[in-house]
C-alpha cells in the first residue's frame, strides 16, 4: 500500500479551480518530485494535501482517508509540510520553533533528544538556539523550517520549493540534508522544486504538472535522460 | 509631599487598570491583528453582571469570579461566532463588526440594568479609615488591593505566555497562524482561548476600577477607559504585553500628575492626554516603546 495516495484531487481559490483532478502516490521511504511551470498548481497541490485549503477528491495515508481542510489531522497522520517561503515563527527563538514543531507529541524526553539531534545535523541552528528566527539568514531559516517539520516525526515530508531565494551553494546543502534525512530515517518526501536538476538527483520518481493536471510521470533517471522531455519541461 | 504621594497612589491605581485593559487589547491584537473596540464594553457588561450579583447578596469576591468566567465565555464566543467568520474579509470588516458588538453590549447593559449610575461595592476594606500612612500620605487598602490583584493577573499571564506549552502555542499562533496549523497547533481553540482570557482580564479590571469612585458604574464608564488602554497599548507597542503594562502604569500616573502640576491642562483636558499620546506615538514611533518593527530577512 502506498504511503500517500491522492486520487482525483480538485482544489482552488474561491471560484477559480486550479487543480482539475490530480492523482499521485508516494511509497514508504521514497522521494518523489513534482515539476512544472509557474501556475501549474504545484503549491496548490501541497497545500490541499496538507489540509491548508479545502479540496475534493481522496487523500489517504496508509489507506486511511484524511479529512479535507484539517492540517492538524494531517500532522497526526504523519505528514508535515515545509511551506513555500519557509514559514518560520520569526519572533520565536530557534529552540521555540522546534518545540512548536513537536506540539502533538507527548514524549518530552524524546522531543528533547530530537532537538539535540537536529542541532547536530544543522550546526548553524545549534549555535543560535536563543536567537529569534526572523533575524537569521534565508538559508538558516530554511534549515529551521525543515527541522521544525521533522520535529513531528513525520513519515512523509512535503517540501514546497526549498531552494526559493537561496544562493546556489546553500541550495546544495539544503538538498544534502534532505538526502541525509531520507537515508537515515527513511522519511518519504514529496518535493516541489524549480531547480529540476537538483531535485531529479534526489528523487526516484517524478510527476510533471501542467495547468492543474498530471501530464507525465516516471522514474527520475528516465526523465533526466530523455532529451525531449527535458527540453519541454525542464528547460535545459 | 503628602499630596504628591496621594496623587501618585491614585495614579498608580488608575495606571494598573489601564495596564490590565491594555494587556487585554494586546492579547487580542496578537491573535487577530485588530484592536478590539468592544473590549471596554465587554468589561462593562461583566462589571454590571458582578454588580447585579452583589445586589442579590452574592459576596463581591464570588461576583468577581463570576464576572471573569462570564467574560471568558463572552470573549471566546465573540471570537468564534463573530470575528472568525468575518476576518477573512479584511481588517475593516472585523473592526466594523467589533463596533457593532460595542453598541449591542452597551444597549444590552441599558436594557438589563437601567440607565442610572450605580455604586459597586469594593473587594477591599473601603472606609475613610482603611488606609496606612506613608510619609504622611494616605495609602488606602483599596489601592493596595488593586495593585496586588493586577500584578497577580499580569504575572499569571506572563507565566502562561513564557513558561507553558499552551503559551508557546499562543505565541506561535500570533506570529504565524498558518505555520502553527501546519505544526499541529489547534489554532481555532487557541484563538478562542486568547479572546476569552483577554475578556476575563477586562472583567477583572472593570470590577476593580468601578469601586474606586462612588456612583461610577454607568453606561458611559468604560469608553474613556478604552481610550486610555488603547493609548497605553499603542504606546507600549501593540504586540508587546510588557510594553502595554509599563505604558499603562505610566499613563495613569501622568494623567493624575500632569493636571495637578500644569495648570493649563486643568481638570478638563485629562482625556486629551490620552489622545495626544496616541497621535504622538503614531507620528514619532509607530512601533511603540517596546513593540517590534516588522524587520525580517527572507
Image: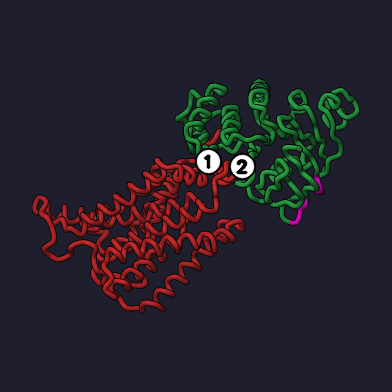
Chain colours: A green, B red
| Residue shown at 18% from the left, 58% from the top | B141
Task: Give the mark nearest the N terminus, 2 or 1.
Answer: 2
- The answer to whether residue A96 is visible is yes
Disc number for residue B200 = none
Is residue B149 shown left or right of residue A61?
left
Residue B146 percent location from the top left of the image: 25, 56
Identify the residue position indicated by label 1 in the image: A103
| Residue shown at 50% from the left, 68% from the top | B100
Q: Local crowd at mark 2 within 10 Å, few (<14), some, or many (≥20)?
A: many
| Highlighted range, magenta | A15-22
Secondary element at tag 2: helix
Q: Name the foreground residue: B243 vs A115.
A: A115
| Residue shown at 78% from the left, 34% from the top | A35
Q: Quadrant of residue B184?
A: top right
Q: Name the foreground residue: A22 vs A79.
A: A79
Q: Is residue A19 magenta?
A: yes
**Spatial distance from mark 2 to mark 1, Cα to Cα?**
10 Å
| Residue shown at 87% from the left, 31% from the top | A232
Residue A39 percent location from the top left of the image: 77, 42
Q: How many marks?
A: 2
Secondary element at tag 1: loop
Vertical side of A230 occupied by B166: above or below: below
Vertical side of A121 occupied by B274: above or below: below
Is residue B256 shown left or right of residue A88?
left
Q: Is residue A166 magenta?
A: no
For the stretch drawn in magenta, what is the main secondary structure? strand
Tags 2 and 1 both on a single chain:
yes
Vertical side of B75 occupied by B104: above or below: below
Identify the residue position indicated by label 2 in the image: A75
Vertical side of A25 occupied by A186: above or below: above
- The answer to whether residue A134 is visible is no
Amino acid at each position: 500500500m502506498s504511503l500517500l495516495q491522492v486520487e482525483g484531487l480538485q482544489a482552488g481559490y474561491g471560484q477559480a479551480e486550479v487543480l482539475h483532478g490530480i492523482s499521485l502516490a508516494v511509497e514508504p521511504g521514497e522521494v518523489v518530485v513534482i515539476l512544472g511551470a509557474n501556475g501549474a498548481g504545484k503549491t496548490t497541490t501541497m497545500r490541499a494535501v496538507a489540509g491548508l485549503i479545502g479540496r475534493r477528491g481522496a487523500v489517504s495515508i496508509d489507506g486511511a482517508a484524511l479529512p479535507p481542510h484539517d492540517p492538524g489531522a494531517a500532522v497526526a497522520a504523519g505528514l508535515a509540510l515545509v511551506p513555500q517561503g519557509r514559514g518560520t515563527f520569526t519572533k520565536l527563538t530557534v529552540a521555540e520553533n522546534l518545540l512548536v514543531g513537536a506540539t502533538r507529541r507527548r514524549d518530552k524526553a524524546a522531543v528533547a533528544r530530537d532537538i539535540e539531534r537536529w542541532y547536530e545535523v544543522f550546526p548553524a541552528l545549534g549555535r543560535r538556539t536563543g536567537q529569534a528566527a526572523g533575524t537569521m539568514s534565508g538559508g538558516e531559516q530554511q534549515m529551521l523550517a525543515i527541522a521544525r517539520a521533522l520535529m513531528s516525526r513525520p513519515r512523509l515530508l512535503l517540501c514546497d520549493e526549498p531552494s526559493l531565494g537561496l544562493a546556489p551553494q546553500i541550495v546544495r546543502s539544503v538538498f544534502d540534508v534532505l538526502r541525509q534525512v531520507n537515508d537515515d530515517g527513511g522519511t518519504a518526501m514529496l518535493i516541489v522544486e524549480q531547480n529540476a536538476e537538483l531535485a531529479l538527483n534526489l528523487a526516484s520518481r517524478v510527476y510533471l504538472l501542467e495547468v492543474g493536471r498530471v501530464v507525465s510521470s516516471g522514474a527520475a533517471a528516465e526523465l533526466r535522460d530523455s532529451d525531449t522531455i527535458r527540453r519541454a519541461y525542464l528547460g535545459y | 509631599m503628602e499630596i504628591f504621594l496621594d496623587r501618585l497612589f491614585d495614579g498608580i491605581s488608575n495606571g494598573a487598570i489601564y495596564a490590565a485593559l491594555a494587556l487585554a487589547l494586546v492579547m487580542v491584537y496578537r491573535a487577530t491583528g485588530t484592536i478590539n473596540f468592544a473590549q471596554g464594553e465587554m468589561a462593562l457588561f461583566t462589571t454590571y453582571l458582578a454588580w447585579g450579583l452583589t445586589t442579590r447578596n452574592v459576596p463581591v469576591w464570588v461576583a468577581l469570579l463570576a464576572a471573569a468566567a462570564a467574560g471568558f465565555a463572552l470573549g471566546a464566543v465573540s471570537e468564534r461566532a463573530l470575528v472568525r467568520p468575518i476576518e477573512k474579509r479584511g481588517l475593516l470588516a472585523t473592526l466594523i463588526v467589533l463596533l457593532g458588538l460595542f453598541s449591542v453590549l452597551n444597549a444590552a447593559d441599558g436594557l438589563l440594568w437601567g440607565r442610572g449610575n450605580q455604586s459597586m461595592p469594593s473587594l477591599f476594606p473601603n472606609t475613610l479609615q482603611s488606609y496606612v500612612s506613608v510619609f504622611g500620605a494616605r495609602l488606602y487598602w483599596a489601592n493596595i488591593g488593586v495593585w496586588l490583584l493586577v500584578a497577580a493577573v499580569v504575572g499569571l499571564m506572563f507565566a502562561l505566555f513564557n513558561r507553558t506549552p499552551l503559551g508557546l502555542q499562543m505565541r506561535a499562533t500570533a506570529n504565524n497562524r498558518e505555520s502553527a496549523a501546519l505544526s499541529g497547533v489547534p489554532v481555532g481553540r487557541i484563538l478562542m482561548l486568547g479572546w476569552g482570557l483577554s475578556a476575563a482580564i477586562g472583567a477583572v479590571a472593570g470590577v476593580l476600577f468601578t469601586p474606586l469612585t462612588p456612583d461610577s458604574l454607568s453606561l458611559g464608564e468604560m469608553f474613556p477607559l478604552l481610550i486610555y488602554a488603547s493609548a497605553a497599548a499603542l504606546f507600549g507597542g501593540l504586540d508587546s504585553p510588557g510594553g502595554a503594562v509599563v505604558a499603562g502604569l505610566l499613563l495613569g500616573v501622568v494623567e493624575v500628575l500632569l493636571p495637578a502640576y500644569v495648570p493649563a491642562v486643568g481638570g478638563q483636558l485629562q482625556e486629551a492626554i490620552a489622545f495626544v499620546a496616541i497621535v504622538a506615538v503614531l507620528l514619532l514611533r509607530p512601533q511603540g516603546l517596546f513593540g517590534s518593527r516588522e524587520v525580517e530577512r527572507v
